[in-house]
Image (tube, grey):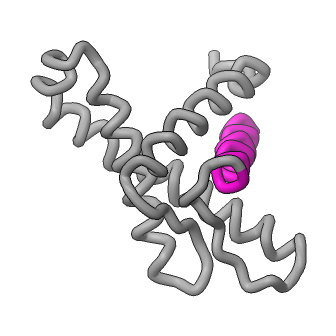
Amino acid sequence: MVLVVRLVINAIAIWLAAHWIVGIDIISSGRGTGWDIVVLLAVAAVFTLVNTLVKPLVKLLSLPLVILTLGLFLLVINALMLKLTAAITETTQYGLRVDGFWAATWGAILITIVNWVLGIFVPDKD
């Protein structure tokens, strides 16, 4: 149940980033709100998988840069994970489009903040 709630939180964060950040769009077919929600949940699932599988390896390999920049390089890693999600989902007709590094950086910052704020209301696994 917690996994589904976290997936919905990711979907809300991505939706907000697509509406507030210029250069981030959710590509949908225009079949209606129900289909848009399905596409958004699919993008959130891919984003969750990328953050679960790829991000730890990238963080480990870039540990010297993270230490050298006092953690600021983690913003770059988050932006790259968002760009990777966009690259994976753009292989279909639907998905996430991120135009440029700065759009990805601002989107990653917004997604992180929304996940943090909404994640306060989700209980941790004991």
The dominant secondary structure in magenta is helix
> Hey, which residue is sitting farthest right in the picture?
33
Q: Nearer the viewer, residue 53 or 86?
A: 86
Q: Residue at horizontal 61%, vertical 27%? A: 113
Q: Is residue 61 left or right of residue 104?
A: left
For the N terminus, give its image quadrant.
Answer: top right
Q: Is residue 66 left or right of residue 81?
A: left
Q: Residue at horizontal 63%, vertical 15%? A: 126
Q: Nearer the viewer, residue 84 or 72?
A: 72
Residue 119 x/y as whole percent: 69, 25
Q: In this rendering, is residue 107 above or below 63?
A: below
Residue 91 x/y as whole percent: 45, 81
Q: Nearer the viewer, residue 124 or 25?
A: 25
Residue 72 seen anywhere in this rendered image of the structure: yes
Q: Residue at horizontal 43%, vertical 42%? A: 105
Q: In this rendering, is residue 30 above or below 21?
A: below
Q: Is residue 2 magenta?
A: yes
Q: Is residue 60 magenta?
A: no
Residue 92 x/y as whole percent: 52, 84
Q: In this rendering, is residue 79 above or below 109?
A: below
Q: In this rendering, is residue 113 above or below 88?
A: above
Residue 7 seen anywhere in this rendered image of the structure: no
Residue 38 x/y as whole percent: 76, 69
Q: Residue at horizontal 75%, vertical 40%? A: 5
Give the tally of numbered discs. 0
> Hey, which residue is sitting farthest front in the picture?
22
Q: Give the magenta part as a residue range.
A: 1-19
- Specify the quadrant of the image occupied by residue 58: top left
> Hey, which residue is sitting farthest left in the picture?
64
